[in-house]
Image: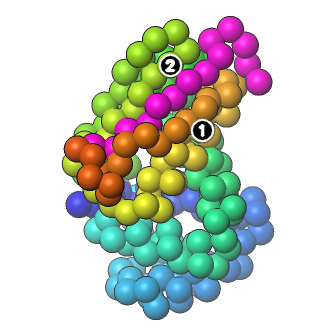
Amino acid sequence: MFVYGRVFWSRFPFLKDHHIKTEIDGLMTEMVRLGYSGPAAIREIKKDERYPLQYLVYYNQAFVNLFGERAFEELARESAKKKGIISTMARWAGTPEGALERAPDSWKKFYAFGKLRTEVTGEGEGVIRLYDGRVNELFCRYLTHYFEGIGDVINVRLSVEHTKCVLKGDGHSEWEISWASDKAP
């Protein structure tokens, strides 16, 4: 399983905005301690190249180890606003329904594994399903907060609940999403 380098690059704005930029060396040191053996500097990662998914697993764990759970949740939510193509598509979609419709194509731009499927299930309700995407619990939490961040991009409060998980024996991971269709936050 692979991710594209742009996954790492999409997280830099958060580090810069929160003055964590000076901690990049510490982040790399922690990643290496966890087993990372990729490029010596995160900035050496090329946006359009594929990298082992395990690099992202090391990154996520190192980030939590250094900055804590709350900062990790903020990172995920803010990344939704900063990931060029995804935030552009979400703005273009303009509605939760439009964002759900375009999410599978956006997934392919960042992740070279898994199949993301979405569906509007009712008025103000939808579901996101990830097939063949067994990673780890931190990745699932990242996605939950990332999906909430998409709501921020389109100015709609999304309630996101991770209801199924392959790590708990389900056949796929699933997030139920709801929103008030008649008003923004």
Magenta run includes residue 182: yes
Q: Position of residue 12 (x, y in %)?
A: 60, 62
Q: Is residue 66 visible?
A: yes
Q: Quadrant of the N terminus?
A: bottom left
Which residue has dot 2 on it?
Answer: 125
- Can you give x and y, in whole percent of width and height, for residue 70 in the image? 69, 61
Residue 79 or 13: which is nearer the viewer?
79
Q: Quadrant of residue 136?
A: bottom left
In the rendered view, tell whether residue 16 sits above or below residue 141.
below
**Residue at the spot 37% in from the left edge and 72% down from the top edge:** 55
Packing grade of label 1 (10 A; few <14, some 14-19, many >=20) is many
Q: Is residue 176 magenta?
A: yes
Residue at image position (68%, 8%) is 182
Q: The residue under label 1 is which amino acid type?
A: Glu
In the image, the segment drawn in magenta is 172-185
Contact (CB < 8 A) between labels 1 and 2? no
Whether residue 51 is situated above or below residue 156 in the rendered picture: below
- Tell me the number on the disc at residue 138: none
Amino acid identity at mark 2: Glu
Q: Callout 2: few (<14), some (14-19), or many (20+) C-alpha neighbours within 10 Å?
A: some
Q: Locate residue 19, reporting x and y percent.
A: 77, 68
Front-most of residues 105 and 130: 130
Q: Which residue is mark 1?
A: 148
